[in-house]
Amino acid sequence: MDPTPSADGTADSSGGHGGGLRDVVQLAIPAAGAYLTVLRTATASLAARLDFTLEDIEDLRIAVDEASALLLVSAVPGSALECAFSLSPGLMRVTVSVDSLDGEPPSTDTFAWTVLNALAGEVSSSTGPGHRVTIELAKRRGDRE
């Protein structure tokens, strides 16, 4: 069932009878570093909407930028980088994905992956059909490592 927006800007997946915020914002940009500013700006705006602290907003903004940069290294030329922001009270999940030349997820034993783990509470990667590579981040409001 699709979420139903409420009067206060939240969405209710239970048809309006309680439950939590379930807004999802999806963006697709060209898979090129020049467009990452769009994702950084969207990340900061959406985190602010969830009343994240300035520190958390900056952490998320950098984490989304870093995850995107990791994926762009092997992105199919001319493809789109897709980003979905799932918003819940005090929690943002961000999924960034791209069609990859090799279909391999980023290495988890790199400095960049360590940075992602430090900035976001949860980080994972996966591969899908057609060499699609995805990184998912989750950050809770006030969650500092």
Image (tube, rainbow, N blue to C red):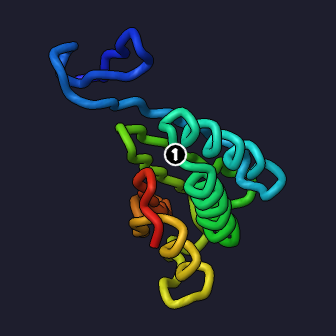
Q: Is residue 16 above or below residue 65?
A: above
Q: Nearer the viewer, residue 32 or 15?
A: 15
Q: Which residue is mark 1?
A: 52
Query: From where the camera sits, is residue 131 visible?
Result: no
Question: Which image quarter holds the N terminus?
Answer: top left
Name the residue located 59 percent from the left edge and 65 percent from the top edge. 67
Residue 49: quadrant of the picture = top right
Name the residue located 40 percent from the left edge and 69 percent from the top edge. 124
Q: Is residue 103 above or below residue 112?
A: above
Three-letter amino acid code at the position of disc 1: Phe
Residue lying at the far bottom of the rendered structure: 109
At which x and y percent is residue 69? Answer: 68, 66
- Judged left or right of residue 122, residue 106 is right
Q: Nearer the viewer, residue 31 or 144?
A: 144
Name the residue located 55 percent from the left edge and 49 percent from the top edge. 53
Residue 55: quadrant of the picture = bottom right
At which x and y percent is residue 81? Answer: 63, 50
Q: Is residue 107 above or below residue 60?
A: below
Residue lying at the far top of the rendered structure: 7
Query: Mark 1 falls on what kind of element?
Result: loop
- Judged left or right of residue 111, residue 7 is left
Name the residue located 43 percent from the left edge and 33 percent from the top edge. 24
Q: Badge 1: few (under 14), some or many (20 or more) residues near its Cα, within 10 Å? A: many
Question: Which image quarter holds the C terminus?
Answer: bottom left
